[in-house]
């Protein structure tokens, strides 16, 4: 049994994996101490079966708490992805200290010697990661959709909280439809433009993989054909566990 975790800015996904297959998923918020929540979830869990524990994290405080919890329960060392020697499975052509380990996990998940990928992740931020063969070349970070929506409604007193929906028309007839149109078509245009610029700059062709909460909304609304993968980060961690001796 392997415990894998993806600690994001908003939520943490913890997965239990056997024979490279996810058998259980748990989602918890990524803020504050989690021991009371974890104890509730894992009351009947047999921690003696756990052999490896690996996380990717963009919230150090949450990783620290989870590391402490699982170390106490399992006596197994809990690793963060960037603590491992990734050179044998991925060449990283960026500032290693500054790239998020979740983005590296995504790259590891799809990396292939003969294919190039753009990975589009709709998270707290909207990120694009560029993978040419097994070389992680870097990426682009844009404001997250929910973050931008919430900021707009918080700062503009006449704009209410809005759930984003797919829009068939561009011109809105009221505040809600105008905001939805701006965000839906605005982000669709941003995505198409950034992908075109990546192709132009690298002079390469790519396959597109999308993940995160809004990937369903945009999958068929952008020009490039996309494959959707909600478990891309965890699958990258599964691949990386072979580096733990």
Image (cartoon, grey):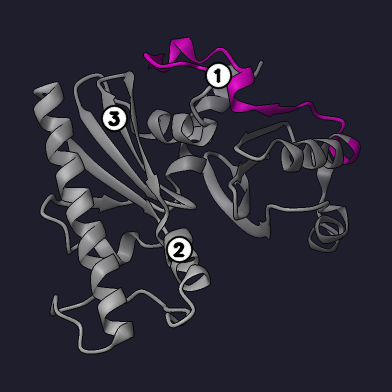
Which residue is labeled 1 in the image?
97
Which residue is labeled 2 in the image?
146
60 or 149: nearer the eye?
149
> Badge 2, how many Cα within 10 Å: few under 14, some, many 20+?
many
What stretch of residues is rendered in magenta? Answer: 72-96
Q: Where is residue 128 shown, x and y percent of the image?
A: 32, 39
Q: Is residue 84 magenta?
A: yes
Residue drawn at (15%, 22%) of the image: 202
Residue drawn at (44%, 67%) of the image: 152
Residue extending farthest right: 72
> Badge 1, how many Cα within 10 Å: few under 14, some, many 20+?
few
In this view, 110 is above or below 189: above
In screen coordinates, is 73 left or right of 100?
Answer: right
In this view, 165 is above or below 220: below
Q: Earlier in the sequence, mark 2 or mark 3?
A: 3
Q: Is residue 145 visible?
A: yes
Which residue is labeled 3 in the image?
130
> Badge 3, how many Cα within 10 Å: few under 14, some, many 20+?
many
């Amino acid at each position: 049994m392997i415990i894998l975790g993806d600690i994001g800015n908003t939520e943490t996904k913890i997965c239990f994996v056997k024979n490279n297959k996810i058998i259980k998923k748990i989602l918890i918020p990524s803020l504050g101490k989690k021991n009371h929540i974890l104890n509730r979830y894992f009351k009947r869990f047999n921690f003696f079966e756990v052999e490896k524990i690996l996380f990717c994290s963009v919230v150090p405080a949450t990783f620290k708490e989870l590391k402490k919890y699982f170390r106490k329960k399992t006596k197994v060392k809990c690793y963060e992805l960037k603590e491992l020697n990734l050179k044998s499975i991925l060449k990283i052509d960026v500032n290693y200290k500054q790239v998020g380990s979740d983005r590296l996990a995504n790259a590891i998940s799809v990396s292939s010697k003969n294919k190039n990928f753009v990975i589009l992740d709709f998270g707290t931020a909207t990120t694009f990661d560029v993978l040419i063969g097994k070389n992680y070349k870097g990426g682009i970070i844009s404001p997250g959709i929910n973050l931008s929506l919430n900021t707009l409604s918080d700062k503009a007193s006449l704009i209410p909280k809005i759930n984003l929906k797919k829009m068939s028309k561009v011109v809105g007839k009221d505040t809600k439809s105008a905001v939805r149109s701006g965000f839906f078509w605005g982000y669709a245009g941003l995505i198409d433009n950034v992908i075109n610029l990546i192709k132009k700059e690298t002079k390469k062709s790519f396959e597109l993989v999308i993940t995160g909460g809004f990937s369903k909304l945009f999958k068929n609304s952008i020009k490039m054909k996309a494959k959707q993968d909600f478990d891309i980060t965890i699958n990258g961690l599964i691949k990386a566990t072979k580096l733990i001796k």
